[in-house]
Image (cartoon, rainbow, N blue to C red):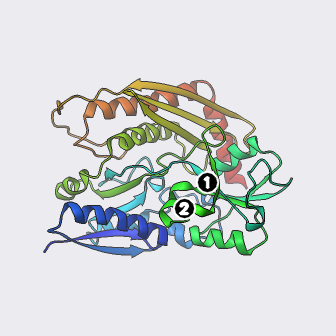
Amino acid sequence: MRVIRVGTRKSQLARIQTDSVVATLKALYPGLQFEIIAMSTTGDKILDTALSKIGEKSLFTKELEHALERNEVDLVVHSLKDLPTVLPPGFTIGAICKRESPYDAVVFHPKFVGKTLETLPEKSVVGTSSLRRAAQLQRKFPHLEFKSIRGNLNTRLRKLDELQEFSAIILAAAGLQRMGWQNRVGQILHPEECMYAVGQGALGVEVRAKDQDILDLVGVLHDPETLLRCIAERAFLRHLEGGCSVPVAVHTAMKDGQLYLTGGVWSLNGADSMQETMQTTIHVPAQHEDGPEDDPQLVGITARNIPRQAQLAAESLGISLATLLLNKGAKNILDVARQLNDAH
């Protein structure tokens, strides 16, 4: 029986996410055997530094990509938001699974259960590892203080509950759902309060770009709507040249054949910001009408089973929105945010 080796990070959440992808593949391919290989990444090891300060784009992916390159694993399951918009040569995202909630969630210290960010006492400290969240929420809730908190979900919840340092922490709602900790969610942040990270809530399966066999194997996992929304989001981020060292956020929706993309940039303290919304028509032909492509990748993603025209329309939407913001002065906001982040 052929064995397919699947790479993952060691954290409990990463294992749950990988197990869910493997369970789907097992159901689709009962004749194959799957072996999960877990490893630690740079981001898992450096826990005393804010993510935005480490200055490394592929914090949670590099070690896994090395294993892929050395043929030690055949595919790797990631949180899509951890995957840079430009992948190292030789790799591609072969599948983007159906997205769970892309929103951020607030988990409150037990003594503040029943509160919201708005009703927390003056000068309450809120923990988050993300400049994007801190910038947007500082602007909305000036009475709160935001402080970096690192570690996997278990560690962060323990820090919240056991240290008297934080009144609340902000986490991705999807991670809490996957861990079965929905009961800890005190508040869901909607886009008008806090737009989400590019790719948040979706899982990406990374493979070797030339490994056609594995590409075909995982390609069936693509969820068309999630794929198109994430292509638009990743194209927006790539064109802005944003990474985790600058506050960039998005919100996407598909409705009646239209793909809507809202994107924004913020200064580190949230005082300066700029956001716009654009939309495009997604024409999905009844049957596949595309010829073969030399380079099928768009923003690091290969999806041969999804109409190319629809993918190109989504990519174009992301680029157009980024260009609009850059023309209105977003580059200045991002440059200052980057310099300030590097200086602290």
Q: Quadrant of the C terminus?
A: bottom right
Q: Secondary structure at mark 2?
A: helix
Residue 151 drawn at (x, y percent):
60, 69
Q: Residue at x 73, y 67 (%)?
A: 110
User: What amino acid type should be assigned to the residue bearing mark 2?
Assistant: Leu
Residue that extends furthest to the right in the rendered view of this protein: 122
The answer to whether 31 appears left or right of 62 in the picture is left
Where is residue 161, by image quadrant? bottom right
Residue annotated with mark 2: 176
**In the depicted view, which residue is nearer to us: 189 or 87?**
189
Q: Marks 1 and 2: CB-CB under 8 Å?
A: yes
Residue 114 pos. (x, y %): 73, 57
Residue at 66% from the left image edge and 41% from the top image edge: 193
Residue 105 - label: 1
Q: Who's the residue at 55% across and 73% down the image?
A: 45
Vertically, is 298 above or below 278? below
Name which residue type carries label 1.
Answer: Ala
| Residue 264, quarter of picture | top right
- Could you tell me which quadrant the N terminus lies in? bottom left
